[in-house]
Image (spheres, grey):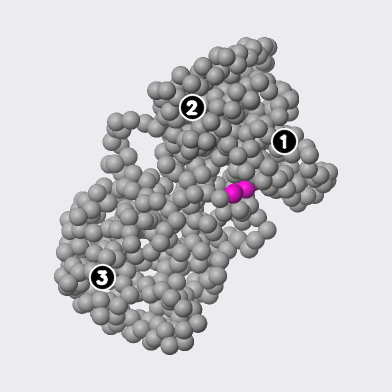
Amino acid sequence: MTSTLLNQPHSSNPIVWSIAGSDSGGGAGIQADLLTMNDLGCHGCSVVTSITAQNSVSVDLVEPISAKMLLAQLVTLWADLPPAAIKIGLLANQQQVDVITSWLSALKQQNLLPVVVLDPVMVASSGDVFNQIDFTPFSGLISVLTPNQHELFRLCSAVTITKPSPSHDDDEHNMVLAAQWLATAYQCQVVAKGGDAPWQGNKAMDVYVTKRVFGASPYHDNQVFTLTSPRVATVNHHGSGCTLSSAIASFSAHGFVVHDAVVLAKAYVTKGLQNSYAVGQGPGVLARTAWPTDLALMPHIGHYHQDNITDNKRSFAALSGPLGVYPVLNSLAQIKAVLSAGCKTVQFRRKLTDANDELAIEQLETDIKAAIHLARECNAQLFVNDHWQLALKHHAFGVHLGQEDLADANLTALAEAGMALGISSHSYFEALLAHQCSPSYIAFGHIYPTTTKQMPSKPQGIAKLSRYVSLFGRDYPTVAIGGIDKACLSDVAQSEVGDVAVVRAITQATHPAQAYRELHHAWLQLTRSRHTCTPSALIKEAV
């Protein structure tokens, strides 16, 4: 399934800078960064910190750029090509750290600081030491820090950490402690890379420590996650750290939150390693493999030292067919109206303003029972939003849950009862967590501005929706939600999303049944070319 929107040329690509050393062998440093940025649809600019004489076998000479020339590059580029994101790699000496941090501090004072990803190049994955630099002046100036194992423990040498032991549990614990310490010390997210950790065996596990991420759910702030992928057996991994950090910067430049940029970058590096190749007598380089669209290559997200509800495999009921136009309503009268108009899937969503209001709770249960009865009479699928206990008690077809509700809901009980499950998501990261629950469908929102609920995230827009569908659309029914009405249906259809949830387009209509019919007919016309006339093909295409 390929979105027509993804193939359209862009008039301008986001600008991303690489502040790093030049690798004359072309496998790492600025050369690797620019290749990655271009591959991911960004315009890459370079601020050279050092010139190296190296090939795939050895680094024979490193010559730093002067502080005057370094600052001139920063000032000149900023005057005409200000970046949406910056990746910082090899810094040759402490003077370069001082020049760059002073310049970044001035941007911060003007509220102009972009996303900054620091790859603290101190030690190669082989263990070779490049330099001894104090990176602490970057504290409060960077968004993400990406040390490898050697760099991780060198950076936090001031903290007391248990000495390595034969237990892999201790190794992982030490890795987490070190990453947490760095996140606090540098006031940023930390991706502690595990690719150079032999104790991890056939897995490549990174530790991702989050702080406050604006535009993302507060539920994932100040947490520790593990990001695990199968280890790729190859010696062609030169420049893997540069590729990861420049990919994080590139995805961020496209407007994706840091959580998304990190998981996408890990998938990008995994595929790059799978397709890596040798160019000389030493370790080869990663392939550039474009925007990730293979769900199997995305990392598994684990919640460190918490019950990972998404790890348990369950089987939820499948949808009987495409949802099409999917009304989300809080009124029994409106539910009855759309069902009478032929709607075959509807969601009952009513929020309680006071969780202790017994009369409201009693009325809620009464209305949920009535809504379930109405749907059964019309042979329709009714999802209950949030109130999973009542949905389970009264045998609703399914439950729709938000990310913050997943931890509290008894997903096993819902699956054992043969119920369907829909899950909301507002990012790649959240959609991956939903995927790990194996739901009946995944909803993406909010696509347009909405007044029906307060959202921490910005409107996703059609371009992001297209990206989500390209990754998840082959494996799940996909639903777009948030601010969708008849006027924007055509744009939403271009994303190739399977179905659309609508709220105000029906709840604020004078005649809900008529509004549903018009939306349903319009959506059928827009998506007719996707399907053949057989029911099995309809379901296959929706999935």
State yes or no: discs 1 and 2 in contact (Cβ < 8 Å). Answer: no
Residue 331, disc: none
- Check disc 1 and report its element: helix, strand or loop: helix
Question: Along the polypeptide, which appears first: circle 2 or circle 3?
Answer: 2
Which residues, given as a range, are shown in magenta?
Answer: 207-211
**Label 3 neighbourhood size at 10 Å, few (<14), some (14-19), many (20+)?**
some
- Check disc 2 and report its element: helix, strand or loop: strand
C-alpha distance separating marks 2 and 3: 47 Å
Left or right: where 34 falls relative to 134: left
The C terminus - image quarter: bottom left
Please name whichever residue, 93 or 106, is drawn nearer the observer in this view of the structure. Answer: 106
**Label 2 neighbourhood size at 10 Å, few (<14), some (14-19), many (20+)?**
many
Residue with the mark numbered 1: 155
Which residue is rendered at x = 58% and y = 63% of the image? 309
Asked whether residue 265 is in view, the answer is yes
Image coordinates of residue 445 in percent, x first then y, are: 38, 56
Which amino acid lies under the numbered mark 1 shown in the image of this protein? Leu
Is most of the magenta stretch helix, strand or loop?
A: strand
Asked whether residue 376 is in view, the answer is no
Residue with the mark numbered 2: 17
Most extreme residue toward the front, as rendered?
109
Left or right: where 128 falls relative to 186: right
Image coordinates of residue 5 in percent, x first then y, are: 29, 41
Above or below: residue 405 compared with residue 450? below
Please name whichever residue, 108 or 386, is drawn nearer the observer in this view of the structure. Answer: 108
